[in-house]
Image (cartoon, grey):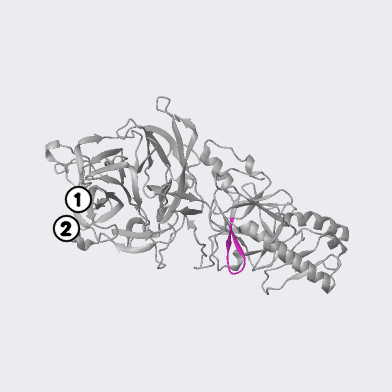
Amino acid sequence: MKTFSNFSCISQDPCYTRIMSKTGLATVKTGQGLLPQKSRTVCFLTTLIMLFFNACTLFNNEAVAGEKTGNGTQAGILRSGVQLSDTDGNTLFGNGGCMLQVVRHKRNGDDIDYSTIDSVSPYIYWYGEYRYSSGNALGVSCYRTTDMVNWEFRGNILPESVSVELETDGFFLERPKVIYNEKTGKYCLWAHREGTGWNYGYASVLVAYGDSPDGEFTYYKTFRPFDDPALDVHDSGYTGDYSDDDLPYGYMSRDCTLFVDDDGTAYFASSSSENTAINIYRLTDDYLDVDTSWLCQDALKYNQKEAPCIIKRNGVYYCVTSDTDGWNVTPSRWFYSTAIGGPWYYGGVFSDNDDTSSNSSNDRHSDRSQPAYIFKLTGTNASHKTSWLYLGDRWGPAHGGSSTYDNEEVLMKIEFDDTTLTTTYNSSGPAVPLCNAFFSEALVPDVANGEIGYPQYFYIKNANDQYLTNLEYCYTGTNASWTSTEPSSVTSGSGTSKRYRLQYRYQYRCVPTNYGYMLVNRYSGYAIASNGTGENGTCSMQTRDAGDEKQSFTLEVYDSNYYKLKNYATEQYVSTWLKTTKAENIQLNGSNILWMTSYGYYPGWVGSEQTYRDYYTATKIRQRWQFIPVNTADDEWDFE
């Protein structure tokens, strides 16, 4: 390692402290060598006090509980875009499912006043496809929480053993949804049922009910909506399942959702007619069947659609669905209406960078996820404030996994723009608030107050006005990068969604480890890591691992505004400097690669002492970093 303690140019550098080193010791230096002991003590104590207050100021919004797993955890933080674990450390199978929070309303005898909340359950339940190692879902998993962060596995509420029919005929389930019926006190489950194969020709609905949200449910029936022969409804099906003269009665039903309106009326929506239409059905009062006197057929009237999710907010119904392309990611789109029966109007792409007519696979589409459900969180305190959470499925085959057993959960806070009403693509439609969601690698739920927030993120900017950033297409091993472009000026592209993504690429969260901090990017969820173990190497983005010393950085106080970022494994410092000879200039897609170097060291140095002096002055400002807090309360880009 190159040192400069004998060079007088170091006198330009003020007193600094090296702390949090592997030995736990601190060394205080000046440009002319070590200070006298008394001065060293004063400087050391002063710097420690400075570090203490700076750290408190910098991380006072971080709820740090230490490291619980190999990937590190923080109290109160719900991660997104990963395969989550339950409180026993086992895989949380929440894909395709929903969350349920029981909200009870005032009663007057048998009458229910749905406009007045009586009580809100402190428990939230997460139901999902109970996966086996083969990827098949042969039941419905149930988890319970009071904070939306720590999920306790309650069991498989619909095992094969609940019904002789299920045991003998064979089946697998997708998209289980559970709602609570205040009139009957029953918990009602609807799901997409298929046969033992994967050709999706069975295309039917399974219905079950339970007396408690996490006990074993009772199997009720399997059917297709409107299957009464008197109605004479036939929908298409694959000939591998049905002969031409043996098509079942009723509409095909695959991806599905449940929705309870403000008046307690429940609706079931599912993709039908080989996914060319989304039908909305009204349920009977017991929530166990469809009311065949009412139907909103082909509600959305927009290409092939699946994975519907329906909510209602301030008198406006929103429906989020995806295009279709097998297990590949496709654009999700949102629709809106002022009546559940329509007409429905196209609102635009949902959580996406672009709006193309193609449904081909693209990593930008819906943050590589398909909609599963939109959960309405109601605060348990007297205010009963509500927030909305998008539950999305990042299917294993869509991100390199071997099967759906490798699925990941994408959780996003849904935002509504009440300041600007829009008719978006439909001038004939009513003006409504814009609806969208933006992926952030971590959320901070507050169940008591009914809020979904974010942990503290930072813009990390050096004294040369250069920012740590993240490439738009980022995978494990992608080079870490930097830019001189101000994040506040990155607003290009069509639509709000692209603007948020581009700004999120600049934002990092400091996650504590046993060795310092991981620097985790908000956009990708990856952590900056030093490549190799030697000096003067590059940095890359890696799947976060708190046990990897190359991903840990110590923050050395330079002055009241700046830190130096020292890698724990290599003892090198983060720098934006690039080698300048043509052969060594390294860029990737126009983005500059982040470097690890000795403090004040420039890789291309040659010759004279004057060259050392010049390059030292130019280099050190690229190795001093300022942490600028992001105003995550409203995601305004506030640098003040």
Quadrant (top left/top right/bottom left/bottom right) for the C terminus:
top right
Q: Is residue 114 magenta?
A: no
The three-letter amino acid code for the residue at tag 1 is Thr
Quadrant (top left/top right/bottom left/bottom right) for the N terminus:
bottom right
Residue at label 2? 165
N-term-proximal mark, 1 vs 2: 2
Q: How many marks?
A: 2
CA distance separating discs 1 and 2: 10 Å
- In the image, which residues are magenta? 509-519
Residue at label 1? 222
In this orientation, does residue 137 appear?
no
Using residue 319 as the reference point, say whether residue 436 is left or right of it.
Answer: right
For the residue carrying disc 1, how many other residues have a C-alpha within 10 Å: few (<14), some (14-19), or many (20+)? some
Tags 1 and 2 touching, CB below 8 Å:
yes
Residue lying furthest left in this view? 230
Q: Nearer the viewer, residue 452 or 354?
A: 452
The three-letter amino acid code for the residue at tag 2 is Glu
Residue 580 position within the rendered picture, expressed as x and y whole percent measured from the top left: 75, 53
